[in-house]
Image: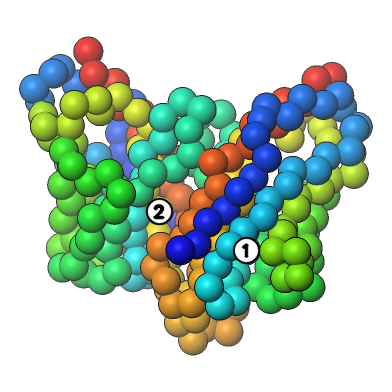
Amino acid sequence: DGGITQSPKYLFRKEGQNVTLSCEQNLNHDAMYWYRQDPGQGLRLIYYSQIVNDFQKGDIAEGYSVSREKKESFPLTVTSAQKNPTAFYLCASSTPRGSGRALNTGELFFGEGSRLTVL
Amino acid sequence: GNSVTQMEGPVTLSEEAFLTINCTYTATGYPSLFWYVQYPGEGLQLLLKATKADDKGSNKGFEATYRKETTSFHLEKGSVQVSDSAVYFCALRSGGSYIPTFGRGTSLIVHP
């Protein structure tokens, strides 16, 4: 079945360590996104990528980095510069709205999330 | 810019009660509108969508109608179940934008 896979589901990090969250999709989507969710909060956009080898900062990119070397993969690295990294991280993908496909409405498809805790 | 405003929660209901979660938006052009649901510890799932004015999206007993005149997309369900307890997000995408706009989410708690 097509979908988005995030790993690991739970991750613990010591202060000062970088960690990388994996996101893989087999939906053949061009666009991919990383969001951060804190308890009782909405979604905040970290980075997004419209196409391979291209990505843009979202609203809270400081302390994070990404790469998009393959269409299927969009890993997120939480660096030691991120001062408060404990959160739930969500990866998503979509086709652009109005891409020409008859049934495309531009909805996002989300992974199951990765919960990062800093010890 | 685009924005989505949804009612603050939590919304607490008894089983079989009627549910309404209000959502209003501001956007350029003619956006597509969405409701997503997030169960505890999981990612978001698309619940329903509408792509043009007066369209009604429906799924699992939930409904929402795209009202352009009032810029609203309120979520309704006639009889909620305990299993509907979750956080519900209203969202839109306008034009050729790669970036959707999400509301802050509304927590629904249904008691037996």
Residues A18 and A47: in front is A47
Task: Give the residue displayed 53% in from the left and 56% down from the top.
Answer: B3
Percent of width and height locating residue B69: 76, 70
Q: Which quadrant of the figure contains the C terminus of chain B?
A: top right
Residue B3 numbered tag: none
Does residue B9 appear to the left or right of A57 in the view shown? Answer: right
Mark 1 and mark 2 on one chain? no
Q: Residues within 10 Å of mark 2 (few under 14, many from 20)?
A: many
Residue type pointed to by label 1: Leu
Task: Give the residue displayed 77% in from the left and 58% down from the top.
Answer: B64
Q: Residues within 10 Å of mark 1 (few under 14, many from 20)?
A: many
Q: In this view, does B107 lie above or below B21?
A: above
Does residue A46 appear to the left or right of B112 in the view shown? Answer: left
The residue pinned by badge 1 equals B33
- Label total for image: 2
Percent of width and height locating residue A71: 26, 66
Chain letter of the residue beneath label 2 in the structure image: A
Percent of width and height locating residue A97: 48, 75
Residue B16, image quadrant: top right
Q: How far is disc 1 from disc 2 in space, using C-alphas?
A: 17 Å
Task: Give the residue displayed 90% in from the left and 33% down from the top.
Answer: B17
The residue pinned by badge 2 equals A92
Does residue A60 appear to the left or right of A29 in the view shown? Answer: left
Q: In this view, does B57 lie above or below B45?
A: below
